[in-house]
Image (cartoon, rainbow, N blue to C red):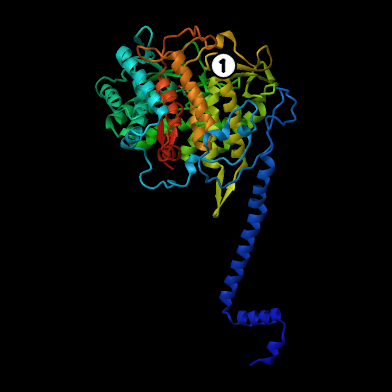
Amino acid sequence: MDLNTEKLPNFKSSFLLFKRKWKRLPKFLRFYLIVAIIFIIFTFSYYVLFIATKKSLIRIDENVDPLLNNDNNGDSNQNIHPPSQFIEHNIMLPPQNSNSDNFDNTNKEFVSTKKLPSILLDGDDNDDDGDKMITNEELFIASKKQNEQQKLIQEAIQHSWNGYRKYAWGKDMLKPITQKGSNWFGIGLTILDSLDTLLIAGLNDEFKQGLEWVKNDLTFDVNENVNCFETTIRALAGLMSAYHISKEKILLEKAIDLGDRLIHCFDSQSKTVPFSDVNLKKKMAKAPSYMPESSLSEVSSVQLEFRDLSYETNDKSYEEKSFATSKHIHDLIQQRKNYLLPMYINPYTGNLMTSTITMGARADSYYEYLYKQYLQTKIEFLLDDYIRSIDAIENRLTSRTKSKLKLLYIGEILNTDQQSIHPKMDHLVCFLSGTLALGYYHEHLQPFYRLQIVNETFINHLKLAEDLARTCHYMYNLTETGLSPEIGYFGQDYQDGDFYIKPRDTHNLLRPEFVESLFFLYHITGKQIYRDWGLQVFNAFQKYTRINTGGYTTINDVRHPKNVKPKDKMESFWLAETLKYLYLLFMDDHKIIRKLLNNYVFNTEGHLLPRRV
Ligand code: DMJ
């Protein structure tokens, strides 16, 4: 026995023992142990410094309501930047119930950044194994488990389809009051735009009626100048989306035929900026005589569709020709060092033209496709341009009304006055909430080793999305019919306070943008309020736009419930988007919703194109 050791104090003896044992270890083992210890210390410090610190900040920011506590004093021309917010990175929580989000005009709950649960991330069926693609059978089975709201919306889809079938079969659009059809391009637009909605709602018989028409009657050999953008987003994407779900080969064949005609839109002098119109029969593109320039949104929102066609046909030329436009616009941005672009671009020279900067008509889907193309391809410059554009929108185009409501709106910059924000917002702008929420869903957690790091940029995007959706809700809620006008004016100068409708803007075209955003916001945040708003909008459509004999009509005046002045037209996006997004807003099958958001990208007309990355 070693007596000396016994006399030593405990810690010293252990230390000497450890030292002796350590020296007996082989050199390489000692080296690896030291590396392992350093790694553990580094990881632990990282966690304490970054993750835990951020978590503790949540508690502070939960009490801050950026809508009510900003220093701006209501100057609508001054841009407002809500304080940066933090959110717990672990959001694997059960969905919230309705009462957690009781809406009130100045409600703190609504804008606070308390934990955002997502039904997409709930624990019970969170695995994506099995087929990632949605099948016809799956949708049909889900349609047999519809909730009450979905049943009503499915009925509205049938009512619209039946009216169209009865009075306008094969025409582009239904005129439900005079009970006839009208043509725009002469390619049965409503059928092509509706096919995937019918499949999603489990209406297989109706889908077969449309499919038979495509097989037997559809021809693109029409001697008509059609709008390249509208035909691509509605007809080409409608065919591709229905093909992806149903696997009916004829749909792909027709899509290829149409794609081969539409690709001639890119035969312009600039080669990079397409013309606005193309003659489908002659395959010749041109600018319409009344408008030599092309719209920013139109030239930059056809790439998802052509790329999808390239994927399916293994013919890269569709993608290459259309993506040349995106690359060209990216180069223009680099030269300008400005991420907000004017609404017109010249197809002869490829130059941007001095014109209004807006998030509404003629520009809107440019911003949408920056992100959605990134989702489809993972090409980095698209995400970079998207993030910088949203930043510029927040800094240069966003303002708030002066009243207590402090409604956030995204205005315009006019040519004639580039310093101030013109407080006009199209209903079209409401799409942005959905795109921002989608970006948040996919990007706000960034993996670092095994930790998920929160990216604050996207947390702020979600806040902007929710704030904008609140304003869009007002656009509906402040009218007597509960339907939004086409355009609203915001700000203190108007006699009605926050919101003013000019007489020429009082129409409602059955547009989808608000309910589209509600679909994304509801499923991504789990907040019941978004379903409540969706139901309000649906009920208002039922009350003021439904025609008993079949179909729904656009209206001229949302201000007068007693006389909404029907316009006698059912736009094809009513079935393609508005009713589809409403139906999906109320979809309780999380697996389907997860597949939709994870594995597809919705084009700007609500059609499903698979992600291939
Ligand atoms: C649709 O054709 C598309 O959503 C497009 O991007 C904008 N306009 C209509 C719907 O409002």
Residue 513 image offset from top left, x and y in percent: 50, 24
Farthest residue toward the left? Answer: 216
Residue drawn at (50%, 7%) of the image: 562
Q: Nearer the viewer, residue 456 or 261?
A: 456
| Residue 96 seen by the camera | yes
Rendered image quadrant of residue 216: top left
Q: Nearer the viewer, residue 374 or 209?
A: 209
Residue drawn at (33%, 28%) of the image: 255
Rendered image quadrant of residue 159: top left
Task: Determine whether the residue tagged by mark 1 lies in a helix, strand or loop.
Answer: strand
- Image quarter where the N terminus lies is bottom right
**Dot 1 crowding, Cα within 10 Å, few <14, some 14–19, many 20+:** many
Residue 129 image offset from top left, x and y in percent: 39, 48
> In the drawing, does residue 202 fall left or right of residue 58?
left
Residue for badge 1: 487
Residue drawn at (35%, 32%) of the image: 143
Three-letter residue code for mark 1 = Ile
Rendered position, 238 above or below 589? above
Residue 330 image offset from top left, x and y in percent: 55, 33
Q: How many marks?
A: 1
Q: Nearer the viewer, residue 28 or 175?
A: 175
The answer to whether mark 1 is within 8 Å of ligand 1 is no
- Image quarter where the C terminus lies is top left
Farthest residue toward the front? Answer: 99
> In the drawing, does residue 98 fall left or right of residue 259?
right
Residue 594 image offset from top left, x and y in percent: 44, 40
| Residue 510 seen by the camera | no
